[in-house]
Image (cartoon, grey):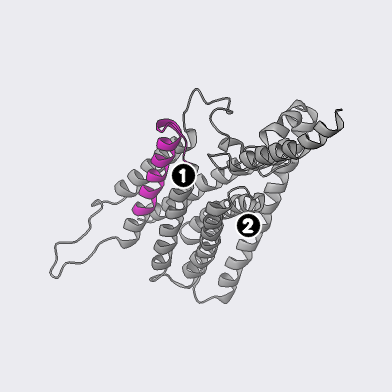
Amino acid sequence: MGNGKFGGHFYPGLYIFFYGLYQATLLSKAMVVSDSPVCVSYLPKSKNRCSKLRISYGGWLKIVTGSLLTSYVVFCLDDGMVLINKEMPPRFMYPQEWQHLTMFILLALDGCVDVVSKSVLRQRLVLLERGATTLGIYVLLLLLVSHVQVSSKVELQVHSLLILVVFLLMLVLTAELWAPEMVHLWTLETFLFLTMGSWLMQAAFILFRPVSGFPWKDDDISDIMFVTTFFCWHVMINALCMLGIYGISSFWHRCYRPGLRMMGSKEALFHKSSEGTFYKLLQESEQQDRDDQAPLLSKSSP
């Protein structure tokens, strides 16, 4: 049982942390290449070099990861995922494991939405993809709030800090549904995914496999205070990690791929929206400028 709970925290945290690193790489590339809040992976299919393949690697990764974690939760229990026991009166069994199972199934379903949007539909629906991810974070927050009802002091402190991160991520993702082109929101989203992943991995070691070999004590105020201290260290380390990724990307593109900076000025016109809203508005403004200049040119030509 202990190994199952350790894996239920560590492996999801590992996946989320690497997803945050992937997002940080895309963010740094977009900022360096185009100096604009552009998500390279959200370019319209007609402008994307991989448009002929139409393979959603991120979506399939979510499906595979969610399916593996679901199988892990199911098979880590000796008597299987029993919902209700046979005693009288009947009682629900393994409430925390069922919550973990729900989270992992949502991850797989989120991947299915990504695959359908990117690989099946004729026109990609980015709003549908973002909406599915946001809905998953909403459900995750609800599950985490009830997850801490039976927690001890140390476990309560660990999960409370995790709930804080998930709550902030929920707000950012909700705001991105209306303002997907804001680089500030994309930066916050990436940072929160990194913090969420690294803290989940740390929580697995605090609660189930302490590095010292001795369990953390609920009656020791020092242990509870150091939980918050470790969380603050994670915040600082993840911020430095994002700065490091940006620095490496900037150095790489300036020294080895300078040509991408010229291409970036054109790619910067395409934002996260599948409709290319910003690009259309820019075209309309340019056309309006031409119309305004046309009478002046016609008068000056004679």
Q: Residue at x 29, y 51 (%)?
A: 77
The kind of secondary structure the magenta stretch mainly shows is helix
Left or right, 203 with reference to 243: left
- Can residue 50 be seen at all in this image of the molecule? yes
Q: Residue at x 44, y 45 (%)?
A: 128
Q: Which mark is residue 129?
A: 1
Mark 1 secondary-structure assignment: helix
Left or right, 152 with reference to 39: left
Q: Residue furthest top?
A: 52
Q: Which mark is residue 276?
A: none
What residue range appears in magenta?
102-125
Residue 241 percent across, percent down from the top left: 68, 48
Q: Is residue 171 above or below residue 274?
A: below
Q: Is residue 267 above or below residue 20?
A: above
Q: Which residue is mark 2?
A: 234
Q: Residue at x 74, y 36 (%)?
A: 290
Q: Nearer the viewer, residue 204 or 166?
A: 166
Residue 205 percent across, percent down from the top left: 51, 56
Mark closest to the chain's N terminus, 2 or 1: 1
Q: Residue furthest front?
A: 302
Left or right, 81 with reference to 15: left
Q: Residue at x 38, y 52 (%)?
A: 4
Quadrant in the rendering for residue 39 = top right
Q: Which kind of residue does numbered mark 1 sit on? A: Glu
Residue 185 percent across, percent down from the top left: 62, 53
Q: Where the N terminus falls, by quadrant? A: bottom left
Question: How many residues crowd around disc 1 within 10 Å: few (fewer than 14), some, or many (20 or more)?
Answer: many
Q: Where the C terminus falls, by quadrant? A: top right
- Can residue 29 be seen at all in this image of the molecule? no
Left or right, 63 with reference to 157: left
